Image (cartoon, helix red, strand yellow):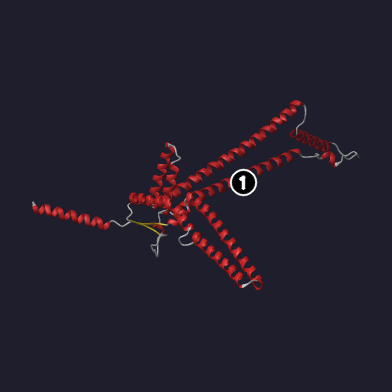
Amino acid sequence: MRKQFLFLFLALIVANTSQAQTRTTRIGYIDMEYILENVSDYKEATAQLELKAQKWKQEIESKKIEINKLKENLKAEKALLTKELIDERETEIKFMETEMMDYQQKQFGSDGNLIHQKMALAKPIQDQVFTAVQDIAEAKNYDFIFDKSSDLTMLFSNKKFDISDQVIRVLNRTDKREQLTKKQLKDQEIKETRENEIDENPAMADRQKALDEKRAAREKLIEDRRLEQEAKKKEYDDRRKAIQAEREAKKNGTVSEPAKATEAGKTTETSKTDATAKPATGTETSPAATEPAVDKAAERQKLYEQRKKELEERRKKILEEREAAKKAKEAETQKPNTTNN
């Protein structure tokens, strides 16, 4: 009995050891600078801080101009001044230079206001990033996640281990959740689950891309058919209106363009019949009498073909514009997702 128990115990130890050895260590990294650049709140605050820094630079530049002006005046009047006045002015200039340097160091030094305010702006975002990284590490079983932009030296980093875009998506989701309704929250959770699955499985990302391309092609085909139906409908409406106008003209006693063309054709046929039936009797009919004045039917056919060509060109132009707008929109939405884990 003891031997069986010992055998089972050793077998369990061997199984756990082999399972631990086969499990690979998951490592990822983030780029804090890249994340901060893609957070809207931080970008807006940084822009305001940049305006403040420009104001500080202008103040320092104006002080430099004032000091240079005092130096030039002293150089020009030095021959007319006593030694005591010269020393007094030089002392004043030196004091102003020291004051300017202290102000510059206070604003732009290694421990200046600019550095402190940048750190104050970045700290709330960094705390959110830290929380998001912890959530991702727990959900996806990461063992180590490093910061590429920190003091840690990374000689090489494979892009497939970069989870910065995932962190940005988590931050954006948190901002959006505050403004969504219950239904929108449910849709957002489904979308987030789908994105997480794609991050975990690159093959699924390729399959999703293929599905998106098929959907886009199907939508384009449907749109082409719709535009073609609209063009045919417009052509049918134009033809119906022309027939209706002709009927109205006949009803009112006026002759429409198609009717005129028909009458002109009949007159031509009659004149040709008379010319062949009667021999020449000394009086010749002029060519203008035997030929129709204007072939209205041919003109109408030409206008109809021209209108049809214009409709076709307009339809192609609409399709090209919609396709270009759609591609631009897809590029804009896929821009932050150019690299997936």
Q: x, y percentage for residue 296?
A: 76, 38
User: Residue at coordinates 36% horizontally, 49% vertically from top-left?
Assistant: 135
| Residue 230 quadrant | top right
Q: Which residue is at a point 52% across and 61% down the rendered structure image?
A: 103
Depicted 259 relative to depicted 48: above or below: above
| Frontmost residue, 78 versus 32 | 78
Q: Is residue 330 left or right of residue 85?
A: left
Residue lying at the far left in this picture: please name it.
Answer: 1
**Residue 34 location in percent, x, y?**
45, 56
Q: Is residue 23 left or right of residue 223?
A: left
Which SS class for mark 1?
Answer: helix
Picture quarter with the C terminus: bottom left
Q: Is residue 84 above or below residue 288?
A: below
How many discs mark residues in the rendered view? 1
User: Hey, what amino acid is under mark 1?
Assistant: Lys
CA neighbours of label 1 inside 10 A, class few (<14), some (14 to 19), many (20+): few
In the picture, measured across the screen, residue 290 lies left or right of residue 212, that is right
Residue 120, given in percent of the width and then of the height, sits at 44, 53
Residue on which the image places disc 1: 317
Return the residue found at the far right.
282
Compare residues 82 and 258 and report the one nearer the observer. 82
Front residue of 100 and 73: 73
Residue at the image point whose x is 60% and y is 44% from the top = 318
Q: Position of residue 104 (x, y in %)?
A: 52, 62
Say which quarter of the image contains residue 279.
top right
